Amino acid sequence: MPAQLATMTAARAIIKKNGKAIGYIRGLRLTENKQRGSVMGVGEVTKKERPLLSITCTWSCDFYLIDLLESGIPDLDKRDVQSIGLYKDTQTLLASAVDIQVYKKDVVTVSGGVVTKTKGTVFCTVNDVYLDSTSWDITENQISMFNQSGEYTSPVILAI
């Protein structure tokens, strides 16, 4: 395998939600923090065990801002409603999580030194993604950005 195909790069990544590619995404970051306790015992000053107490899984993503309805992960933050009251009720009573799939583009066939067919191979799936924060910026002489972040409920598992 050529060295350039051994590493996952942004040019090979495809981010999808329900099978539909998410457009204009600039970056996706997943962080899984493990909280451990300390077991020492009476009369001990050194730790004997570090048992796992919890795992917190966070995510963040950046998009190029196109407009406020089309930017971001689809269906994660339903803002096209008629009033603030409807928005609040939807957020409170219809909180829903989405799954995000990350694919990598791989070569299927090469003909005469030209890639003629590719396929998307699952790189990972992030299940039960919840939105906690949305922000955007418009800055002089810059491309406007749209950012979302939150938590997901389970660590990413890579099935073999």
Image (cartoon, rainbow, N blue to C red):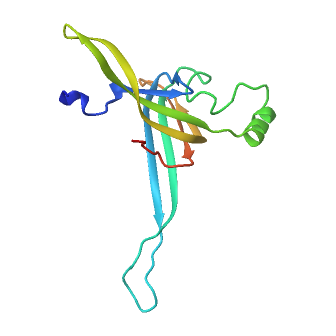
In the depicted structure, whether residue 109 falls above or below residue 138 = above
Tally the marks: 0
Query: Residue at coordinates 58% horizontally, 37% vertically from top-left?
Result: 134
Q: Which one is in front, 95 or 89? A: 95
Query: Residue at coordinates 43% horizontally, 42% vertically from top-left?
Result: 159
- Quadrant into which the N terminus falls: top left
Q: Which one is in front, 81 or 129? A: 129
Query: Residue at coordinates 53% horizontally, 49% vertically from top-left?
Result: 154
Quadrant in which residue 2 is drawn: top left
- Quadrant into which the C terminus falls: top left
How far from the left and from the top, in percent, is residue 27? 42, 33
Q: Which residue lies furthest to the front in this view?
A: 160
Using residue 77 as the reference point, say whether residue 103 is left or right of it. Answer: left
Q: Can residue 138 be seen in this view?
A: no
In the depicted structure, whether residue 131 falls above or below residue 113 = below
Using residue 142 as the reference point, say whether residue 115 is left or right of it. Answer: left
Q: Residue furthest top?
A: 112
In the depicted structure, whether residue 44 falls above or below residue 101 = below
Using residue 84 as the reference point, say whether residue 65 is left or right of it. Answer: left
How far from the left and from the top, in percent, is residue 71? 55, 25
How far from the left and from the top, in percent, is residue 116? 30, 10
Query: Residue at coordinates 79% horizontally, 38% vertically from top-left?
Result: 89
Quadrant in which residue 68 is drawn: top right
Q: Which one is in front, 127 or 69? A: 127
How far from the left and from the top, in percent, is residue 35? 48, 63
Q: Can residue 47 be seen in this view?
A: yes
